[in-house]
Amino acid sequence: MSKNTDELFKNVIAHAKEYGFVFPSSEIYDGLSAVYDYGQFGAELKNNLKTYWWKSMVQLHDNIVGIDSAIFMHPKIWKASGHVDGFSDPMIDNKDSNKRYRADQLLEDRIAKLDEEGKTSEAEELQVEMDNALKAENLPRLRELIIEQNIKCPISGTANWTEVRQFNLMFSTQVGAIADESDTIYLRPETAQGIFVNYLNVQKSGRMKIPFGIAQIGKAFRNEVIARQFIIRMREFEQMEMQYFVRPGTQKEWFEKWKAARLKWHLALGTDAAKYRYHEHTKLAHYADAAYDIEFEFPFGFKEVEGIHSRTDFDLSQHQQFSGKKMQYFDPEIDPATDKPYGNYIPYVIETSIGLDRMFLLTMINAYEEEDLSTAEKQDSRTVLHLHPCLAPVKAAIFPLTKKDGLPEKAREIMDQLKLDFNLQYEEKDAIGKRYRRQDAIGTPFCITVDHQTLEDNTVTIRHRDSMQQERVAADELDKIIGDLVSWKNLLK
Ligand code: ATP
């Protein structure tokens, strides 16, 4: 990370805290590692991101519905899904600092460093070696690579490493009063399984025909061993997942469709396309026959924001086996090859899985600008969030020019009308310029000032966040002006 990008990232984190977007969890107790709380504007922005996702996935597709399944599930589900036995990361400890690291991430960091130093072929070679070792689950080989590369613990500065071991990422807890092995349940590490175990409930109650999708937004928990990069890697985070159930044999075609559709969703927000890239998985998860990540270029490099996975019939078949319940779907459509209905089968699944917190960070970083407004006469600057108006936590702020002469009452009157449609803020403290700056910092698209002329002709000044242009408009038009800009139609069409 260069000094500039490092600084940008630090500034965004500081800004997120100062302006009520993201706070470290339990801060007065010195925080809880890899857990964060969303503040008053963060919660609004997060809700708007959820709305954007939900509307484009559920509302715009008549064959996709949304559910909200419980976080706690029968423990056998995690046996069936493979998480009890297979959801682990290769860990290595440094014996001098007693610090634990993900073996693959130590190597990834090394690869990035080699790349930075222009040693591209060495980097590529190491990448291949690491991928092979991961694929073969060859833990001793991973350790060898770390030793060969002379990778040292950043804390102790030594290369005194333990063996590499697998470490399960699921949190467990006990159900009921008596703690006993058989009562162990897990906090879900992904929302997907809640969809799989309900797929027939939804299909039957909703009379869904293949292909169809089930979407869900919810918390997931992973005991990530190393917490880093702010809300990129959290122990409690939120996912927005959609499972698309398709006829076996058509999964490739649907995979390609969703891969393209999901990138389009990201780009509709106006983000520079060069900031995004696809990354193909070389080490496929135990359930997948194809997998791509959508990566975004954060200040610390490209990182996964969303995964598109072709999960085959793995999950449903496993649940059929472990529960003893049929997971088949009857497809009445005629197969042109046989002239008979396709009949009974276990559907194949394409999954799109996006991390809401990573999407949140991406959005903040993209929007953040320290703008120099200096002129020949004076130095000036502002920090502004150029958030898409649909995502902005506050749509408009209403300012009476002064606290007297009936201006606050008039401003309140205008606000009372508009607040039925929009999230607004009322501010009467400080000079107008200062109030503008505060709204710029949280990304409010409009500031509306009520002055003495308003009392005479019911007009106000409206100031636009990005251009900082002001215009005088009739108060009665505000509804339409704000509505036109923040309408979800702008994003969804
Ligand atoms: P990574 O390789 O970065 O650990 P992953 O491949 O394990 O991620 P998936 O299991 O595919 O992630 O989960 C889907 C999405 O959930 C990811 O694209 C990411 O946005 C988000 N996600 C996963 N783990 C975390 C986490 N610990 N904190 C925040 N978001 C996460």
Image (spheres, rainbow, N blue to C red):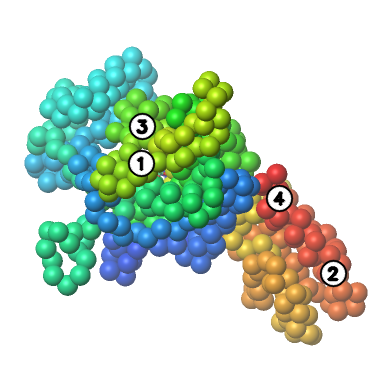
Task: Kindly identify which residue carries mark 1.
Answer: 316
Name the residue rendered at 28%, 28% in the picture. 110
**Picture disc at residue 489:** 4
User: CA–CA distance between discs 4 and 3?
Assistant: 35 Å
Up the image or down, 327 lies above or below 136; here it is below
Name the residue rendered at 24%, 51% in the picture. 76
**Left or right of residue 199: residue 147:** left
Q: What residue type is labelled 1?
A: Leu
Q: What residue type is labelled 2?
A: Asp
Does ligand 1 reach within 8 Å of label 2's beta carbon? Answer: no
Task: Kindly identify which residue carries mark 2.
Answer: 476
Q: Can residue 98 be seen in this view?
A: yes
Q: Quadrant of the N terminus?
A: top left
Q: Nearer the viewer, mark 4 or mark 3?
A: 3
Judging depth in this view, the residue of 228 and 19 nearest the camera is 228
Q: Which amino acid does label 4 sit on?
A: Lys
**Picture disc at residue 415:** none
Q: Are marks 1 and 3 in contact (CB under 8 Å)?
A: no
User: CA–CA distance between discs 2 and 1?
Assistant: 56 Å
The quarter of the displayed image where residue 154 is located: top left
Horizontal and vertical percent position of residue 4: 46, 39
Dot 3 or dot 2: first in sequence order is 3
